[in-house]
């Protein structure tokens, strides 16, 4: 039974409806708060949480419930309220279900998972006790050791929810890795993959044959020395074993077009962020992004001005954002905004999905690169084409590296290179000049064979040349 229950309601959960839900454990159940009141908890007799309920989130972006839950939601805008039950306590799971059921009965809407919506009756929980702190001190963390924090996610998509974002932050502040455990069939949001980092943080997938394996590398894992770690091969000369299911892949014809780029803007009162990403979206899809947010689901309609205001309020601290497209063209971007001595930097990673019968608009790349270079202070950009899912989700299967299609060097970067190094490359042909002749950016098509990895060899040669190696 899932540990997370989500109520999708047509009306805002007001204090009275939330109170009615919290009484699912009876009037004598202890209630506590965390995160300055943003999280309300039903607790056992010793004050340890049975169910943690996050503040309701107004979602005004279509398709997010379908993308993340595979569930139908009320028409936008609707309210998304998450309740997380303490792992391994059946009464806690029933309490979360009854909480969601009571909200839906009062406010209209639906619950995920559907089977969680059940009885409105009080759940008997007398004498129930849960794990002691510190594991219970962080609502999203199920197991805590001196090496890692472990989060169990039984959801269709492991997304960068506010819960999980808090767990990442808490683990980093404590100097711990974060290990996410999910069942077979679960996928990972690119937003989580991009911040998961390296060892000992991992995405761990349960498997009938091999037990547990790393969803991104396939390494077979076991719980040892306080964390999930790779199983050693019997033969010391061989690599660690890889799960058989991880290697079970087939080319479906689906592709992803991915762009990674960096922009540095002068810091002034007229600056509006997000324009470069919107340009990319319009050039490749014909539309602006659908929505954005500081976590998933992305809940706010696309607005560069609101995005800029948020980053300004948080400065000098960095701002991390997720941006999504509409259902007709799956797309997802993560944006990191930082204030540096050079100005205001935007680091963007974005991918768009295409089915087997759909063409990737690679012919639009030069014009797109020129727009970024001339209007949005582009520093550099790498474009890749990958054999990957159209829906952008990351499966626990092998997905090979992308094929680099092009690299772009911004005008300021070209200017700082000595002599004509930027124009004189080891690759066949010459780079394409973008923008004013007096101060051009340069577009480098990468002529590698799309059927193998030779494009990366060309890219490495180009990078070594530009660095003067």
Image (cartoon, helix red, strand yellow):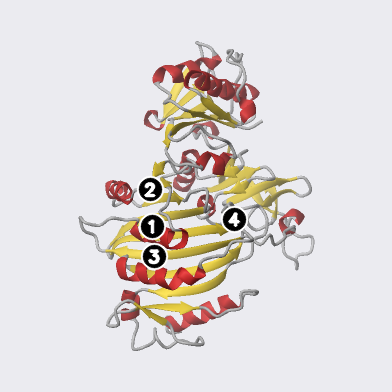
- Could you say whether the residue bearing mark 4 is in a helix, strand or loop? loop
Closer to the observer: label 3 or label 4? Answer: 4
Name the residue tied to disc 1: 278
Instruction: Say if 103 sits above or below 380 in the image.
Output: above
Residue 448 lies in quadrant: bottom right
Residue density around tag 1, few if under 14, some if 14–19, many if 20 or more, within 10 Å: some
Name the residue tied to disc 4: 390
Instruction: Say if 298 sits above or below 124 in the image.
Output: below
Residue at screen point 52% across, 18% down: 105
Q: CA distance from mark 1 to mark 2?
A: 9 Å
| Image coords of residue 78 (percent x, y) | 45, 32
Question: Is residue 224 something that shows in the picture?
Answer: no
- Could you say whether the residue bearing mark 1 is in a helix, strand or loop? helix
Q: CA distance from mark 2 to mark 4?
A: 22 Å
Q: CA distance from mark 3 to mark 4?
A: 25 Å
Name the residue tied to disc 2: 302
Name the residue tied to disc 3: 262
Give the mark nearest the N terminus, 1 or 2: 1
Of residues 367 and 439, the one nearer the viewer is 367
Q: Are marks 1 and 2 in contact (CB under 8 Å)?
A: yes
Residue density around tag 4, few if under 14, some if 14–19, many if 20 or more, within 10 Å: many
| Image coords of residue 441 (percent x, y) | 35, 77
| Image coords of residue 272 (percent x, y) | 28, 55
Residue at screen point 30% across, 51% down: 308
Give the mark nearest the N terminus, 1 or 3: 3
Question: Is residue 412 something that shows in the picture?
Answer: yes
Closer to the observer: label 1 or label 3? Answer: 1
Residue density around tag 3, few if under 14, some if 14–19, many if 20 or more, within 10 Å: many
Q: Are marks 3 and 4 in contact (CB under 8 Å)?
A: no
């Amino acid at each position: 039974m899932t540990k997370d229950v989500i109520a999708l309601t047509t009306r805002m959960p007001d204090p009275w409806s939330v109170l009615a839900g919290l009484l699912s454990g009876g009037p004598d159940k202890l209630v506590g708060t965390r995160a300055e009141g943003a999280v309300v908890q039903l607790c056992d007799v010793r004050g340890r949480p049975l169910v943690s309920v996050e503040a309701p989130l107004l979602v005004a972006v279509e398709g997010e419930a379908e993308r993340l839950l595979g569930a139908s939601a009320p028409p936008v805008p609707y309210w998304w309220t998450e309740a997380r039950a303490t792992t391994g306590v059946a009464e806690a799971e029933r309490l979360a279900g009854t909480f969601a059921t009571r909200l839906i009965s009062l406010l209209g809407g639906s619950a995920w998972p559907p089977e969680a919506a059940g009885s409105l009756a009080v759940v008997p929980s007398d004498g129930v006790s849960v794990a002691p702190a510190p594991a219970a001190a962080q609502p999203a963390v199920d197991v805590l050791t001196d090496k890692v924090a472990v989060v169990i996610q039984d959801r269709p998509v492991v997304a960068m929810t506010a819960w999980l974002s808090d767990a990442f932050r808490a683990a980093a502040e404590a100097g711990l890795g974060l290990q996410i455990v999910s069942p077979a069939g679960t996928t990972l949001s690119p937003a989580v993959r991009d911040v998961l980092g390296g060892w000992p943080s991992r995405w761990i997938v349960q498997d009938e044959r091999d037990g547990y394996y790393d969803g991104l590398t396939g390494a077979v894992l076991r719980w040892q020395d306080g964390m999930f770690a790779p199983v050693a091969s019997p033969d010391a000369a061989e690599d660690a074993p890889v799960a058989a299911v991880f290697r079970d892949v087939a080319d479906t014809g689906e592709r992803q077009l991915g762009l990674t780029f960096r922009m540095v803007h002068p810091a002034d009162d007229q600056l509006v962020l997000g324009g470069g990403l919107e340009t990319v979206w319009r050039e490749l899809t014909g539309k602006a992004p659908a929505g954005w947010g500081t976590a998933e689901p992305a809940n706010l309609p696309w607005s560069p001005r609101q995005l800029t205001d948020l980053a300004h309020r948080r400065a000098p601290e960095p701002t991390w954002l997720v941006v999504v497209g509409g259902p007709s063209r799956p797309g997802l971007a993560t944006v990191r905004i930082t204030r540096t001595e050079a100005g205001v930097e935007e680091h963007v990673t974005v991918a768009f999905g295409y089915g087997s019968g759909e063409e990737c608009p690679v012919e639009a790349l030069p014009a797109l690169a020129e727009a970024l270079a001339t209007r949005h202070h582009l520093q550099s950009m790498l474009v890749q084409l990958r054999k990957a899912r159209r829906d952008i989700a990351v499966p626990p299967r092998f997905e090979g590296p992308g094929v680099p299609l092009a690299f772009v060097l911004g005008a300021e970067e070209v200017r700082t290179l000595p002599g004509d190094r930027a124009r004189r490359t080891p690759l066949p042909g010459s780079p394409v000049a973008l923008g004013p002749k007096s101060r051009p950016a340069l577009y480098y098509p990468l002529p590698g064979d799309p059927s193998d990895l030779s494009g990366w060899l060309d890219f490495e040669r180009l990078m070594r040349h530009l660095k003067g190696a």
